Amino acid sequence: MPRELGPSLNERQFFLQALKEEVRIDSRGFGDFRAIQLDFGDEYGVSDVRIGKTRVLTNITAEVTTPFPDRPFDGPFTITTSLSAMASPSFSGPPSETEVLLARLLEKTLRRSGALDTESLCLIAGRAVFSIRADVHVLSHDGNLTDAACLGVVAALRHFRRGDSEVKGEDVKVFTMAEREGVALSLLHYPLCVTFSFYEGEVVLVDATLSEEQMREGSCTIGMNKHGEVCQIAKLGGAPVDAVILLSCSNLALRHVERMSKVMEERLLEDAKRRYKGGIKAEPSSENARVP
């Protein structure tokens, strides 16, 4: 099966020499992110995130299902990842290590931290709940998939509107967007990821490109919200890292999380203004063409 070739010896030596001279190949500072672009689709719950040449599309869907027996008041929240060979030759064949790690980090950052209030999805205890699913599609891979995917999922969850519902006895009716205005999901906080790559013991890069990732000695992903609350820290093997360096990484992560949160707030506000420019009744009518 085709796999991406790693950097050559000359490329590695050139890269490490540049780091010693405090120079990054793309001229960024060691702690700088690439340009972040966030867009939303015509339908609610679709986000398109670009960080440099890395691009991730996320789609949120909801359906009424039966809750798990041990969680009768909670609606299921699942995250699936799709990494196709179109995004990178290394994704052809069985699930790659990159895909497995991406799914685990999103799980730890978003589901285990309780970002989504799953109890708010309950319609009838033990019988009917909304099930929320986030489908993450990697369209282009040039490094730092975790940060881009996490931003995409959180933005899509905030943008999504489920159908309004009505419960009469044991019967549940879910209205279309044409019949009633959609209902936003209840999110308790908005955790985002910042990934650090380590080289030559003490050199730390933020938002590594694919070529930089292929030459790193280790990495660490910190999940955090804009209030500085750490949701998870994932140091997945690699060279050991001093605790002081990890502490400085967490401080830098907060600044980047605040910046990404600001971008997300601005884009959500712009999208809301675009949708409601025709008045409060313009939004439900925009869904009429998609109602069977």
Image (cartoon, rainbow, N blue to C red):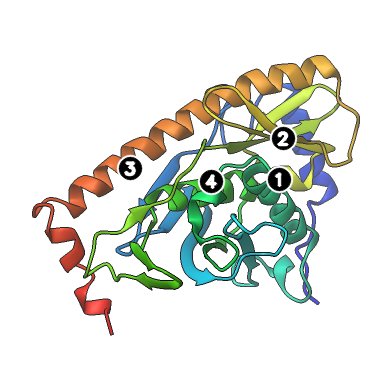
Which one is in front in this view, the residue at disc 3 or the one at disc 4?
4
Tell me which amino acid carries mark 4. Asp
Q: Are discs 3 and 2 less than 8 Å apart at CB?
A: no
Residue hosting label 3: 267
Q: CA distance from mark 3 to mark 2?
A: 26 Å
Q: Are discs 1 and 3 less than 8 Å apart at CB?
A: no
Decide: is 102 above or below 290. above
Q: Residue at x 64, y 48 (%)?
A: 111
Q: Earlier in the sequence, mark 1 or mark 2?
A: 1
Residue hosting label 2: 232
Tell me which amino acid carries mark 2. Gln
Residue closest to the far top = 244
Secondary structure beneath dot 1 equals helix
Q: CA distance from mark 4 to mark 2?
A: 18 Å
Mark identifier at residue 108 = 1
* Front in this rendered view, residue 275 or 186: 186
